[in-house]
Amino acid sequence: MTTLATYQIAASANDAFEGPAGAVVINSGTIQLRDAGSWGGLRFQNVLVPQGAVITAATLKVYLGGSNRGVDTDVYGQAIDTAPAFTTSTRDISNRARTTAVVTAAQLLPSGWYSFPDISTVIQEIISRAGWASGNALALILDHKSSVNLVDFAAYDGSPSSAATLSIEYRIPFQVSKGGLRGRVHLYIEDAPDWTDIVSGLAPECDEHGFGFMPIMIPLPHDQVMHYYARLQFKEVELTANGFTVFHGRIEDRAIVSSGLSLTAYGYWQAFNDGLYNGFWSRTNVNDFVPVKASDISTRAPEKFEMDKNGRLYIAPRNGEAFGTTVTPAYSVGGLTIEKPYKSLQDYAWASFSYTLVAPTTWRAELYTNDRLFTSPVAAWTLAGNGATQTGTWSGALTANSRIEFVLWCNTLTYTVSGTGSIYLEITDLRINGRAASTVYADHIVEGLIFFIVSENPSQLNASAAFVQSPGLDLPDAAWEDTPPARVLEDLLLKGDNQTPPRRWEAAVWENKTLYFQPRDDDPPEWYVDAHEITVRPSGSTLFNAVYTLFRSVDGRTVRTVTETDANSVELNGVTRTTVVRSQATTTGQAHAERDAKLEDSKTAVPKAALRVKRLYTKNGAEVDLWRLRPGHRLTIRNLPPTSNGELDRMTSFIVARTRLLVDTAELEPIPESPPDELAFLLAQE
């Protein structure tokens, strides 16, 4: 059961703003965030949420004034057990310690009440503090990023009834210690009793895509097993410890066994495998264009034209054929068209191309958009012949629709062609986009995937794209048909970004069913364990220090890039080992980016670890809960000395790919990235 409580600013010193110079104002009628480097502070008193409660939702609402242009603001909490009122001391807001959790709001807005994106992670971090107690004061800190997007909202001194509000939805975890894990552990299963005190076999796993899966064994009498077996399919499951989400997912596998009910829950990354995605975003390949037939449009006469798609679109009337208004069919138009993928949510919305038109003045070349059945033509580009060779380029937004068509036709009474190729239209360097812009980045596609998932299954994913970042890399060929969205995300991760060298990107669904699409943290959280013994066997199975890319160019030719070699790795290992990246890229630049990303990842061999630990420490030696270690974090064996050998160093300190928490025995199994087969660690069992 959840509880919802709403709090409103209740005193003059509980809301304030700070300008870029650091002056703090606490008695204004509005909170004014008008420049980059300005800050806002909101303090809510007597917050009656008990320490360790599980925050399921949290909403900050402010009443925006008429001068607003948009919100471009990060929302933090003050990292303190109970927040003091604001003062006019210089930088009293920006100098306050802030939570690690932060939520970004970026949106153009009208006036009126505005709800920030869900800030439950911020509230959870404060409520989970050891010193937090029900009735304490809680402060939010707003870091404004823009001098263009201005934000004014009502303050207590201007209108107490319009002052900011904070709504917190929470539930109290069942207080029990499972398997020696410190603190309160709670298992929540939708539409089921609280089985926390009888459940066994909990072993949640996390991987590079967030919460992986968790087995659950519930001892029940036979009559209850049958009852719950029928009603628990796809129900929500959450395991929390001290208010921290250890696992969040849904039940997919069920089995009736002699001792009760066996369940397996999977994280909400599975939502990206529930459907098949058909999406068009960008295309440079012309191979899928087809001639338009008379059965499609009565004026089309493909038999009167020579057409080809050999790395270009080419339309030329044949020798001896008659064209014009008095022939049959009238005009006798030649057209090449392409239709967007079935059920694609994106229409053809932008195009660019180079053209060559050789034609007399009575001939026309045109680009149309149209619907699937050819009933709504809209001309986007028209060029009349002038008796000479005309060349040029065109780009621009299209009237969004399901198909486009290039046509060539004659606007006269009668015209008979003398020589095939004497009149022709040639289109090269064609690019079509599914958004009205010249570029398509991965974040545009990811936002489209979120919309697709939420449209199909609203309860399976958070609609927010607040944690979707942009790689800044243009993707000239991006289209999928009948593809699970998870595969689309995997494809996008392989693209890297526009950095040199490209960064590695990751996609994961963590708390609140929210998708994170972002570059890997260059400075991830680091945790420490102690090693009892280590055994090393030679292995180079994951080492590749020379890489090239195999791809197909726009005209369909198989192309290989120049091999890129890491000289330091060759010198260190005494051998050059080469591998190939088989890419879907159609441009050399993208192929080079994928090659360089592979080389960066494989130029040093990565170890395998078979670890099982009972203790996890910070750099300063403080013990922390085992579930704090997540994929993407760094784990260091602190009692092994560093070496000058890159492979050995990656055994003593490595990025974690997967974790498995054994709740019953209070042990954690971390697994490094890309492990070879011939290396094992033996760690102390404390």
Image (cartoon, grey):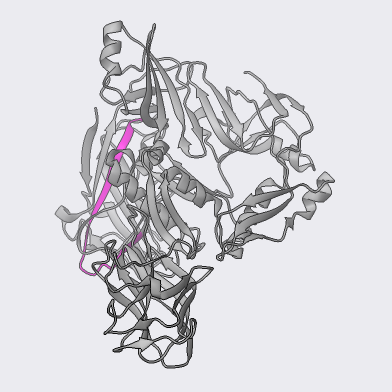
187 within the magenta span: no
Q: Which residues are magenta?
A: 52-72
Image position, residue 570 (x, y; %): 80, 50
For the N terminus, the quadrant is top left
| Residue found at x 39% / y 81% | 321
| Residue found at x 78% / y 49% | 569
Image position, residue 630 (x, y; %): 52, 35
Image quadrant where residue 324 sits: bottom left
Comparing 127 with 355, the one in front is: 355
Comparing 292 with 435, the one in front is: 292
Q: Is residue 623 above or below residue 333?
A: above
**Residue 193 placement, left or right of 526:** left
Image position, residue 17 (x, y; %): 32, 60
Q: Is residue 575 above or below residue 322?
A: above
For the C terminus, the quadrant is top right
67 within the magenta span: yes
